[in-house]
Image (cartoon, rainbow, N blue to C red):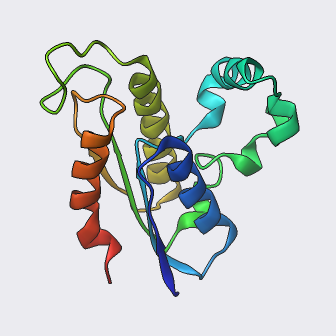
Amino acid sequence: MTGVLSSGTPWGGHGAFMYAARHPGVFEAAASLSGVLDIRADVGGYQSFFQSKGESTDAVWGPPSDWPPHNPADQVSRLGGIRLYASTGDGDPGLLDGGDATYDWVEAGIHRQNTNFAEAAEKAGVPLTKDFYGPGTHTWPYWIASLEKALPLLLP
């Protein structure tokens, strides 16, 4: 194994876990900070997101029935032997948010996806270090704090 993957953005977390799953033996560790770890948990949301950009999920992953090869929760068994870290808030404003912060539906959805991934990892017997820290939104202050917590796992 030769490397470490880490990301602080939702699609980067998805990519880090999928890249590690697709290239066994290359990476020692991967981290996902508020990452998209179960795309099938929100099919309608992703279809709407791509449509708002004038694109289609079919052009990216094909129809939803074809999504499992692109979904970390479906590919978790391929991540065995890799040190994995996943973090997410629950969407409620937390300590790192300003006083005007409101409920964050994006982070709440990401939390649901991370929970699904954690359950799939447990079922597959794949160890996962998770930091589901409760109140927190989909913003950089939380990703920075999570990266600081992930570093000991990421570094050999």
| Residue at image point 54% right, 60% down | 16
Q: Is residue 98 above or below residue 124?
A: above
Residue at figure coordinates x 73%, y 22% from the top left = 47
Residue 75 visible in the picture: yes
Position of residue 7 measured from the top left corner of the image (x, y, whole percent): 45, 56
The image quadrant where one finds the C terminus is bottom left
Q: Residue at 31% of width from left, 28% of height from top?
A: 137
Residue 49 spot, x, y in % from top left? 67, 22
Measured from the top left, where is residue 17 in percent x and y? 55, 58
On the image, the x and y values in percent for residue 78 come to 62, 65
In the rendered structure, the answer to whether residue 148 lies left or right of residue 140 reads left
Q: Is residue 138 left or right of residue 63?
A: left
- Is residue 62 among the parts visible in the rendering? no
For the residue pair 100 and 83, the one nearer the viewer reads as 100
- Looking at this view, is 78 or 86 the one in front? 86
Specify whether 147 is left or right of 13.
Answer: left
Is residue 57 depicted above or below 35 in this figure?
above
Res 11 quadrant in image: top right
Please give left or right for residue 1 compared with residue 92 in the image. Answer: right
Q: Residue furthest bottom?
A: 2
